[in-house]
Image (tube, rainbow, N blue to C red):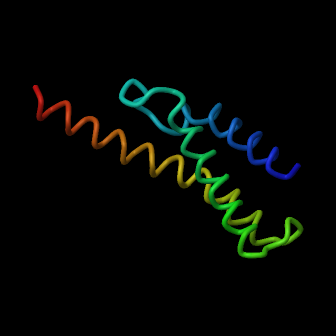
């Protein structure tokens, strides 16, 4: 059930992404929420395997605060690489 909150939160981040990150013509509109969701699911799964309970603060804080950071940083890295590749191939 708790993983559904990650899905909803990632979807909300995806709705906010065009307003936070510019240049979506270089990476598309589905990349930022996909990066956030992959990060969220990965971190949640690792922390569950480590033994953190769903009631603990740290599993929620690291997942919820890390998802927008992963979305912004990952999108900027991908956009920079694509722009660099486009300028070298032309």
Q: Position of residue 24 (x, y in %)?
A: 43, 28
Q: Write the residue at 12% across / 30% down.
A: 89
Residue 38 sits above or below residue 47 on the image: above
For this view, does 81 lie left or right of residue 43? left
Residue under the point 55% across and 55% down: 69
Number of numbered discs visible in the structure rendering = 0
| Location of residue 73 with respect to 7 vertically, above or below | below
Q: Position of residue 39 (x, y in %)?
A: 59, 53
Q: Quadrant of residue 12?
A: top right
Q: Position of residue 51 (x, y in %)?
A: 78, 75
Q: Residue furthest bottom?
A: 51
Relative to 70, say whether 75 is above or below: above
Q: Determine the residue positioned at 54% across, 30% down.
A: 30
| Near-viewer residue (30 or 73) | 30
Q: Residue at x 62, y 35 (%)?
A: 14
Q: Position of residue 90 (x, y in %)?
A: 10, 25
């Amino acid at each position: 059930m708790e993983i559904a909150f990650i899905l909803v939160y990632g979807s909300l981040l995806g709705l906010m992404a065009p307003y936070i990150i510019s240049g979506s013509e270089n990476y598309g509109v589905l990349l930022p929420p996909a990066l956030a969701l992959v990060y969220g699911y990965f971190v949640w799964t690792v922390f569950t395997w480590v033994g953190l309970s769903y009631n603990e603060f740290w599993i929620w804080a690291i997942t919820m605060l890390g998802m927008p950071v992963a979305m912004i940083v990952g999108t900027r890295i991908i956009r920079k690489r694509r722009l660099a590749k486009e300028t070298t191939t032309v």
